[in-house]
Image (cartoon, rainbow, N blue to C red):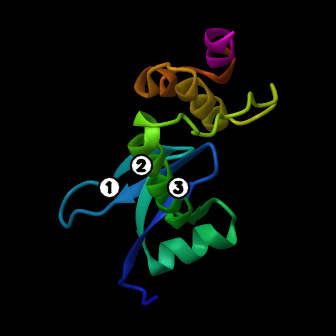
Amino acid sequence: MSTREKADYVLLVHHFDEQIHTKGAPVEYRRHHRGDVLTLDGVEAARLLKAKAIEPAEVEAEAAPAEEADEAGAGAESTSTTVERPANTATTVEWVEYAVSQGLDRSEMEKLKRAEIIAAVQ
């Protein structure tokens, strides 16, 4: 990847403040949280990959077609996989996925803290 080429990555750390460059304007920052998908250039991506703060977003892109196939076949026999209940020490992202699999609204769950999500699914 060249230093100018951009690609998508998933944020693994709690948060990341991305510096926004606008020529002639004061420096601004955009805060990203764990699980957010970021579009980064090669230099910034290499730095964050080395720090293990991000991973390529292709992992999530591969999971999406499988979910679509499950939905397409839902009319026949329900063979969709279920998400197992995560350990209490699992990440907030894992708890959000579990809550969504239990029928709760993703946007609402993403606003909550892990303890609140655990309470909501019990």
Residue 72 position, x and y percent, is 39, 45
The circle drawn on residue 27 is 1
Residue 41 position, x and y percent, is 41, 75
User: Can you identify the residue that label 2 sits on?
Assistant: 68
The circle drawn on residue 96 is none
Magenta segment, prevailing SS (helix, strand or loop):
helix
The vertical placement of 88 against 90, above or below, is above
Q: Quadrant of residue 18?
A: bottom left
| SS of the residue under disc 1 | loop
Q: Which dot, 3 or 1, sits closer to the camera?
A: 3
Name the residue at 45% across, 37% down: 76
Name the residue at 62% across, 18% down: 117
Mark 3 to mark 1 CA distance (whole Å): 37 Å
Q: Residue 117: say if magenta.
A: yes
Neighbor class of circle 1 (other Cα within 10 Å; few <14, some 14-19, many 20+) is few
First to last magenta residue range = 116-122
User: Which sits earlier in the primary sequence, circle 2 or circle 3?
Assistant: 3
Q: Nearer the viewer, residue 8 or 101?
A: 101
Name the residue at 42% across, 90% down: 2
User: Which sits earlier in the primary sequence, circle 3 or circle 1?
Assistant: 1
Name the residue at 52% across, 72% down: 45
User: Which sits earlier in the primary sequence, circle 2 or circle 1?
Assistant: 1
